[in-house]
Amino acid sequence: MEVINIDDIEGYMLGDEKTGTLRRIKTVFTSKNMRVHVGIFPPKQASSRHSHPNSEEIVYVVKGRGKVTAGDETREYGPNTLIFIPVGVPHQYFNTGDGEMVLLAIYSPPTELPSK
């Protein structure tokens, strides 16, 4: 068993504020079958548009409001929403709110995030 306090994880910055893709990533846990991280997005920032060629992704919206584009479909979300992205589908998350957005992401099998 592991008990992890996410507040104790410093994380790293990913993306670029000038391109609107700045966010803090905290890798929380990695095992043989999954990787878990928390993405913290400042207002009006987004992830890059990317895909995971070998992994499914589940995202739980902890805090904030936004929209996700997956393939050709765009949907809005708020707190207490679960998002599923199938293997290989290009997707991008946007913080559309005025406050911080926090997403808990689980990848199976484990995958690395894009470097942008």
Image (cartoon, grey):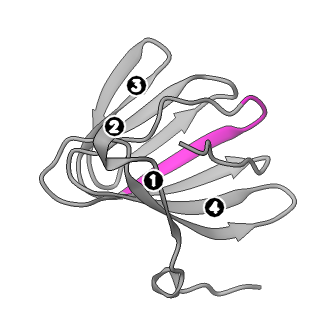
Q: Which mark is residue 69?
A: 3
Calculate the distance from the C-alpha at mark 1 to the C-alpha at mark 4: 11 Å
Q: Secondary structure at mark 4?
A: strand
Calculate the distance from the C-alpha at mark 4 to the C-alpha at mark 2: 25 Å
Picture quadrant of residue 74: top left
Q: Secondary structure at mark 1?
A: strand
Query: Does residue 64 appear to the left or right of 80 in the view shown?
Result: left
- What kind of residue is marked 2? Thr
In percent of the image, x 37 and y 51: which residue is there? Answer: 22
Q: Which residue is mark 4?
A: 36
Q: For mark 4, does the 10 Å Cα neighbourhood hold few (<14), some (14 to 19), or many (20 or more) residues? A: many
Query: Does residue 53 appear to the left or right of 40 in the view shown?
Result: right
Which of pointers 1 and 4 indicates the residue nearer the eye? 4
Dominant secondary structure, magenta: strand
Calculate the distance from the C-alpha at mark 3 to the C-alpha at mark 4: 21 Å
Which of pointers 4 and 2 indicates the residue nearer the eye? 2
Q: Which mark is residue 60?
A: 1
Magenta span: 53-61
Q: Secondary structure at mark 2?
A: helix
